[in-house]
Image (tube, rainbow, N blue to C red):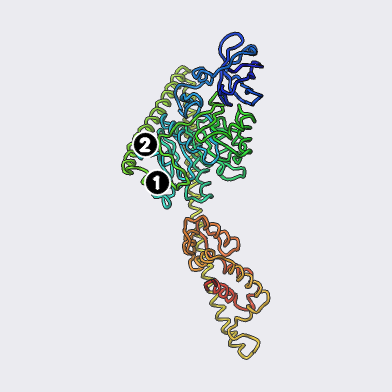
Amino acid sequence: MANITQSSTLGFELEMDYDEGFVEGDFVQAPGPSRGEYVAQITHTETSNDHIEANASVIGSYPDLPFRRGTEVKKADQRLVLETLSLPHEGVHIGTLRGFGTPLYLSVEKFMEKQVGVFGRTGSGKSYTAGVLTEELFEYEQPMVIVDPHGEYASLKIRPDGEASDYRVVEYADLEFNSAADRDLDLDSIDPLDLARPKQATVLNLRGVDTERQEEIVSTLLDALFLARKRDRIPETKVFLEEAHLFAPQRKNEPRSVIENIAKEGRKFGFTLALVSQRPSEIYPNIRAQLQAFIIHKLTDDTDISKIIKNAEGLDSSWGTQIQKLQTGEVLFVGDVIASPTFVEVRERRTKHHEGSEGMFQTSQHAQDATAVDDRQTELDEEVTAATVARLKEHINELEAERDRLRESLEQEQETNMSEQLAELETTVDEQREKIEDLHSKVRDREGSIEELEAQLENREQQLREQRKKIQQLRTERNALEGEASRSTPSQSENGEGDILDHPYVDRVLTRLQEELAALDKYERGMLEFFLYNESGSIEDAYFHAGGSPNSSQRYEKAETLIEKNFIRKRKRGEYVYALDDLIEDKLTDFTDQGNIDVAIDKIEGDLTTPAAG
């Protein structure tokens, strides 16, 4: 039996026998001092002699007076618990209330409007729970965009038994790395309006994409989607961000400012986040502080636990031990979506769960009939398209209704004032159209100017190349004449090459360049050789020439080494040219009267084209 020993209007202390079975997090009920039953939650327990002492905090409504000493406390009735927690009887079904087995539902509207954190150490089930959340939002036709660094979420297309699911999933990926994806993850060809559609989850599969490109994709698309939502061009959308600590870290990176802006302002526009991470402490504090609901799996790192407790309203340090004790599949719900911290056992998924450690998910490897899955996705695409069209029609009807209302309001005004207002509006529209046309004209003129400047630059470079050839020819002729005139002078070399190469300064410059060339690895050396033999080219082509994959993330690191050494330079976006000859000429420009600088250039380039030892 459990009895109250001390109390206040906010909670009570109680003694209970070991066989009573109450543990931290359990809900109990006790009669009030005058009338009614009140629900409290066990927050702390400890042993004392032959019994257990516990603290419980009242949730929901509070009594006017403290509880009577000696009042018996018993396990709370599940109906009373659900009423006290203000939980609906339908909605987002996450799982069951621990200790009761009663289905727990969250309001769809509340869940969509909250910034949510799903946290837990590796293997605790956080991605599994995220999959459950996406399944529930499918049931309510909510649009979702999922940032998927490990290639896991295409598994939503099939059920655990390998049959096709009833969920429309569109997977964007690097088609060179993942040819089975639905569409190419190319920023130039993606329309943000296609990403957020009712009854559809859009998966941005980033597996195989280098870190710099991942950050560019996430920042560009989330920014475009948020802007589209603010302009009411897409419906309310939930963005699931797996490995959130990578995209919103403590250090500043490109996507962090976009995510922070969404975390701060997204709620009022119906564009919210679900951050999924095993290291919540590594998420930028300003973003973590904006979270309003937490789904906490097992965490063992003290820093992670302390950061969660600091940000989650309703938790204190006494909950840290309970978070460490959570079993796989158990979560602690806390925040604005529920009245009190509540332990929940996550339900089983309706779709296939896939771990990123198992490799990228491929439908053909898990479906009983991949063709049937594709056919079902085609059918679902038609439903999504119909739902999108229906939403647009509904929006148009709303706009037309608003227009009619405004017309009626205008008709109530005096005819003269209405005419003046309409005339002013028409004038304003005409002025804006003229401004827009003027801007378009300026843009066209500017584009034409840019093309002309690029053409002039190309011509100027061509002229420089021709002049350099002429100079080299003249130098060769001059050297020939000087050679004939100096054959009788023993101190001069027969071919005229010794003058500049024998000079101490020139020798030091060339020796330093030879050392820098010798320090290049095979990829850097091969890329430089590519630009020597080609007038211009891209980093990808140069790296491929050197024997590497054009999609390797190392290609930019190798190119940066050559650029820093001034061996190559950027001509325009995506195009680079050979610059080693210009570098040599710049360093030796004061010695043009002592010999032929081209001899020095030929010497260095000869070293470049000679295979490196080993």
Q: Which residue carries the number 2 mark?
A: 165
Q: Is residue 516 left or right of residue 106?
A: right
Q: Which residue carries the number 1 mark?
A: 362
* Callout 1 amino acid: Gln
Judge whether residue 255 can be spotted in this image.
no
Q: Residue at x 46, y 38 (%)?
A: 145
Residue that lies at the very extreme toward the right in this rendered image? 504
Q: Viewer-proximal residue, 588 or 388?
A: 388
Q: Rounded to the nearest whole Å, what is the CA distance between mark 2 and mark 1?
A: 15 Å
Q: Residue at x 55, y 57 (%)?
A: 557
Instruction: Sort mark 2 into few (<14), some (14-19) or many (20+) by Cα contacts within 10 Å.
Output: many
What number is the disc on residue 554? none
Q: Viewer-proximal residue, 533 or 150?
A: 150
Please say if 126 is above or below 113: below
Q: Is residue 355 left or right of residue 303?
A: left
Q: Residue at x 46, y 20 (%)?
A: 410
* Callout 2 amino acid: Ser
In percent of width and height, residue 155 lies at 41, 41
In percent of width and height, residue 91 lies at 45, 25
Quadrant housing the C terminus: bottom right
Instruction: Sort mark 1 into few (<14), some (14-19) or many (20+) by Cα contacts within 10 Å.
Output: some
Quadrant housing the N terminus: top right
In percent of width and height, residue 443 lies at 49, 46
Q: Quadrant of residue 525?
A: bottom right
Residue that lies at the very extreme toward the front in this rendered image? 50
Q: Viewer-proximal residue, 84 or 485?
A: 84
Q: Viewer-proximal residue, 509 or 13?
A: 13
Residue that lies at the very extreme toward the top in this rendered image? 34
In percent of width and height, residue 172 lies at 43, 44
